[in-house]
Amino acid sequence: MFQHVLLVLGVAASTALGCQFDYQKSQFYWKNEVNICTDDLCKTYDYLKCGVSKEYIFDQAVGHTPEDILYEIEAMKKYFDTFIPTPTNSLPYKCDGVCSKNMRSIQLQRIFTKVNVKNPDTGAYYPENRMCIVIGPDIYYQQCGGHCDVPDYTDRYCLPDLSVRVKLWVYCPDVTPSCHKVDFDIPLSCTCKKITCQDPFPVGPFQLPSPLLPPPPPTWVPGKGGINTVGVLQHGTPLGAASWKKP
C-alpha cells in the first residue's frame, strides 16, 4: 500500500513538472524563425558567405535583374512603412502593453530559403536551399518571449501575433541567377496569452521544423559546435535601419 501511494505521488509529480509551457512546441510557434540566418550561425557555418558588401549586391541586382529593382524596393518600403513599425518609422500612435518590456524589433538581414537555380551544364532550373542576403526593403520582425507584465499571474506569456507574408528581394551568393524575389512570413506584434495545462497532459515525440540550410561543401571542416548547433538560434541585438546610396 505504501509503495502504491509513492508510485501515484511520483506520477503526479512528474506530470506536474512535465507540464511546462514550451513555446517551440505550441501552436503559437513562429516556424519561420528557424530560417533566419543570424550572426552566430554565420560564425558556426563559416562556409556561408554572409559578409558580401551592399555595394556589390546592388551592382549585381541592378546589372542582372530585368525589373527596376530599386524602384520596386522603394515602392514596397513605402507600403510596408504604413503598418510595420521600425526604429526610424514612428507610427501615429504609441502602444505600451504587457509585452513591451520583452518585445524587440529586429531587422531581417539574411534568411534561409528555397530558390530556383540554373544548372550550368544543362541550363535546367531546379529548387535548392540557399542562404540569401536581404536587398530590400528594410523589414523588421518582432521577437517576443517571457511572461507578460501582469502582476500576480505566472500563466501569461508574450507570443508572436499578426503574422504577415512579405515580399523580399534577396541576393544568394554563388548561384545563377543570384537575385530572387521571395515570400517570407514575419510576426508584426506580440500578444499576451493565458496558457494552462491540458488534462490529461499529452505526451509523445515532437519534432521541430528544420531550417532550409544549404549543405556544406565536401571540403568544409566544422568549427566548434559543429553541425549539431543548427537548431540553436541565438538572436542578436536590435539593429538600426540599413542605409545605402542609390547607385
Image (cartoon, helix red, strand yellow):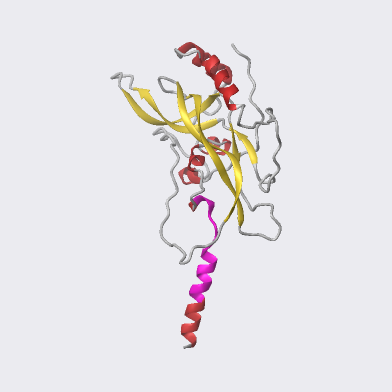
For the record, the magenta segment spans: 10-24
Question: Which residue is at a point 52% across and 17% down the rendered structure image?
Answer: 72
Tally of numbered discs: 0
**Residue 144 is at least partly visible in this image:** no
Question: Which residue is at a point 56% across and 30% down the rendered structure image?
Answer: 109
Query: Would you say residue 186 sits in the magenta stretch?
Result: no
Q: Is residue 242 above or below residue 205?
A: above
Q: Is residue 8 above or below residue 217?
A: below
Question: Which residue is at a point 39% across and 34% down the rendered structure image?
Answer: 218
- Of the 4 image quadrants, the one containing the C terminus is top right
Q: Nearer the viewer, residue 7 or 189?
A: 189
Residue 157 in the figure: left or right of residue 115: right
Q: Nearer the viewer, residue 49 or 164?
A: 164
Residue 134 picture location, percent across and down: 53, 26
Residue 60 picture location, percent across and down: 50, 15
Q: Nearer the viewer, residue 193 or 147?
A: 193
Query: Would you say residue 20 sits in the magenta stretch?
Result: yes
Extreme residue toward the left, this view = 122
Residue 1 in the figure: left or right of residue 142: left
**Residue 150 is at least partly visible in this image:** yes
Residue 215 picture location, percent across and down: 41, 35
Residue 9 picture location, percent across and down: 51, 77
- What's the magenta bit mostly, secondary-structure-wise? helix
Question: Which residue is at a point 60% across and 40% down the rendered structure image?
Answer: 189
Q: Nearer the viewer, residue 88 or 173?
A: 88
